Image (spheres, helix red, strand yellow):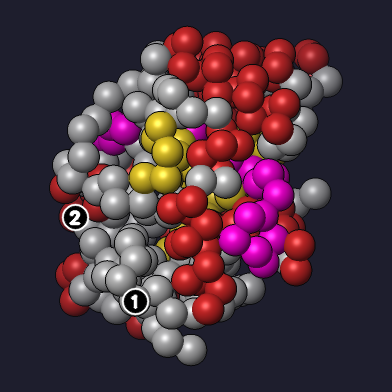
Amino acid sequence: MTITKRVDRITGLTDDFRTATPPCPPSVKIELTARCDFQCFFCATSSNLRGKGEMDWALLEKILVEMREAGVEEIGMFYLGESFLYKKLPEAIALARKIGYPYIFLTTNGRLATQDRTRACFEAGLDSLKFSFNFADAEQCKEITKVDAFDKVVQNIKDAKAARDEVEARTGHCCGLYASSILYDGEQLSRMKQAVETITPYVDEHYWLPLYGQAGLTAGARGTTPVAGNIGRADNRRAPLPCWSLFTEGHVTWDGKLAACCFDHDGRFDMGDLNHTSFLEAWRAQPFQALRAANLKKDVTGTACETCIAYRKT
């Protein structure tokens, strides 16, 4: 299955999930670390709106076991931080594989995804590695991320393919390699298309994402106008309400909180503490049910979603 088909499967809100008490989500993302080495203007991570740290190994093992037993099929070894900053990333992937997850995926900004590091992840059983590639050249990379990393990221993408192919030839396991880019407009879109051409020979698939407002926290940054909510891929946009991420995908912060939002940078979407509550208990908790019910009514007035740029009465 291609990555775009997987994305569309998760973002597509089918009737059986359109309830305040949906089944166990098919996909969950876990924040191994909340730290990031980039400071992108379109991401609120650099604003330090909540504490940053790394997930305790015992907690990681606990929730991985609970979620798999509950029926989670796809596990993302990332959430809002950059997981290649996490020293035990390959070990975390291997743990998820040992527990029995059918599909393990990861998104990275690419700067620290060196050939040795990606090879270790492939050998551990990673099924999908996606690079977020959101700048047109070296100068713009520094402008957007505050880091001089363009050439390094491009080289790491090329090296990842070489490492992937080598591991596949040796072990038979093949990790998909992908890239996504923000669909800017005007001159920037033209520049981005030229940059994307340099990496497409080294990935299995590239796709475009809209510019998100990250729960309203980055709306209007650099004079940009984000789309309403998290509407999936640019080429297959979903309705902003009800927001699919409350129903079909779980999000766990580094300190064990189950968040209702793809962009919970400030903790306002905390639905339960997995240090003390099981995953399914938190997934079905009353605050989560109330937020989903409001989304289904397409009126999130007075909820954590109200200040999000996604809020529109439709």
Comes first in the chain, label 2 or label 1: 2
Q: Marks 2 and 1, Cα distance to the nearest angstrom?
A: 36 Å
Does residue 123 appear to the left or right of 172 in the view shown?
Answer: left
In this rendering, does residue 63 appear at all? yes
Q: Hey, what amino acid is under mark 2? A: Glu
Drawn side of residue 154 relative to residue 250, left or right: left
Q: Which residue is mark 2?
A: 143
Mark 1 lies on a secondary structure that is: loop
Residue 66 versus residue 37: which sits nearer the camera? 66
| In the image: residue 149, left or right of residue 22 | left
Vertical order, 200 against 243 (above or below): above
Residue type at numbered disc 1: Thr
Residue 64 coordinates in the image, percent (x, y) = 60, 23
Q: Which residue in the protein does label 1 denote?
A: 301
* Residue drawn at point x = 57 percent, y = 46 percent: 284
Residue 190 at x, y = what percent? 42, 74
Q: Is residue 300 above or below residue 258?
A: below
